[in-house]
Image: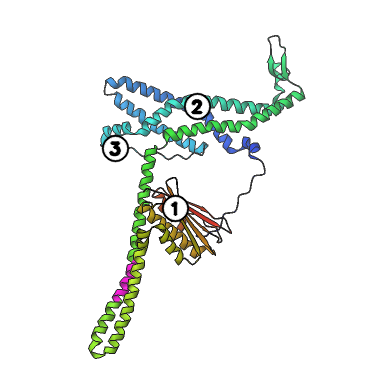
Amino acid sequence: MDSTAYAPEARRPRVPLALRAPFEARTWREFLYHLLSLPVSIVFFVYTITMLSLGVGLLITFLGVPVLAGMLAGCRGMGYFERARARLLLDLKVDDPEPLHRRASGFMGWVGSLFRSGESWRSMLYGLLHMFWAVCSFAISVAMMTWAWSMVTYPLWQWVFPAHWGQEGLQVYGNESGEGWYLDSALEQAFAVVVGGVALLASPWVVRGLSYVDRAMVVGLLGPSKLATRVQELETDRGVVVDTAAADLRRIERDLHDGAQARLVALAMDLGLAKEKLLEDPEAAADMVDEAHGEVKLALQELRDLARGIHPAILTDRGLGPALSAVAARCTVPVSVTVDLLERPAQSIEGIAYYTTSELLQNISKHSGASRAMVDLWRAEGRLMIQVTDDGRGGARLDAGSGLSGLAERLGSVDGLLVVDSPPGGPTVVTAELPWRS
């Protein structure tokens, strides 16, 4: 396999996560996010509800349309701000939706594109709904964090009660006559620290739990729609397919130019010389014709190999089992092939499976240093599964620029998947998954 050095293993922190979580930067960034959410959401809510009410009220006149368009434009700007805030404080990377598609130029074209954009309306919905959640998350996170830290540090500021408020300590409960329970003794202060410590350990997980709701709202209402994301994926996959096809055509052209074409040109020249010598020196002409006959055989073999590289006849006639057995026979490493398929997949998927396995076996021959390899094919829940295993040195990775990354892109273009498990020292297990599509 394509072998590269592994990155050094990260050292495990000595302090458990449960103890260090209250002091981690992530906790405080998410807490800051909830603190800012309340004022930010109030501003956005007031803007959205005001502009929406004004626009709907003015719909009896033409002025309502541009007012609503301005509201949607402002909501889109709000979406950009909120995505940036989530990216900075929640470490949430959400792609910006596609820009507006105008069907006409001018002001009305801009207004129409705003009304047709689903992202504009989802941003408006975010502006209306987020404030209610922001009130809850603000109240819970502030109360939890403030109470926990105040109890943990209670012995440090307990003195303010007798010094300024005329009571022994923090009042837990009491009545109007002044009787009650005050945290004033050393034991009670220690109890407050313990209870506060428990709350402090729990507070990061409460804050993170609240943040997951904010993440869901940002992704669901401010991120690209599933349809737009799928369209973008298909466009990317189409580009990969086009690039792959162009690369294959260039490879075929190069092989023809450097191989069979060059050999046929030399053959034509040799036959021309033999024709000239046919009357003068028949024996020399016969030798040249005999050499040309050998060149014809080599040219035919090269053309057969080229045709096999485009689409092998054995794959079309007999299917994946015999075709992969033929590939395994040409591998420099002993390979066992097991194909458990009751029927054949779609022809295009069959071809991709063949070339995927062929390339993996070529990598084993060139890079793995293995003594044996195994190829297994089976069908599982409407997917074609391919697993190639070798006992080589391992270290194969899906880094950008490697042969495996290009193979993963090719599989991804048909909704396939490539998984590599290759620890240093081996063994290496590469699993490919393809849709069946029969």
Q: Which residue lies furthest to the front in this view?
A: 342
Give the structural element (helix, strand or loop) at label 1: helix
Q: Where is residue 218 in the image (x, y as percent from the top left)?
A: 45, 34
Image point 74% across, 21% down: which residue? 184
For marks 1 and 2, give the one nearer the viewer. Answer: 1
Circle 1 sits on which residue? Answer: 408
Q: Of residues 283 and 92, which is closer to you in this image?
A: 283
Q: Name the quadrant containing residue 425.
A: bottom right
Image point 63% across, 36% down: which residue? 23
Give the structural element (helix, strand or loop) at label 2: helix
User: Within the magenta stretch, is there residue 259?
Assistant: yes
Numbered badge on residue 102: 3
Give the structural element (helix, strand or loop) at label 3: loop
Instruction: Give the CA separation, mark 1 to mark 3.
Output: 36 Å
Is 291 drawn above or below residue 40 in the view shown?
Answer: below
Say few, some or many: other residues with alpha carbon within 10 Å of mark 1 (under 14 / 14 to 19 / 20 or more).
some
Q: Is label 1 in contact with label 2 (beta carbons under 8 Å)?
A: no
Q: Position of residue 320 (x, y in %)?
A: 41, 57
Which callout, 1 or 2, points at the residue further toward the start of the chain?
2
Which callout, 3 or 2, points at the residue further toward the start of the chain?
3
Amino acid residing under circle 2:
Ala
Circle 2 sits on which residue? Answer: 134
Q: Which residue lies furthest to the right in this view?
A: 186
Q: Which residue lies furthest to the bottom in this view?
A: 280
The residues colored magenta run 254-265
Q: Which residue lies furthest to the top in this view?
A: 177
Q: Is label 3 in contact with label 2 (beta carbons under 8 Å)?
A: no
Amino acid residing under circle 3:
Arg
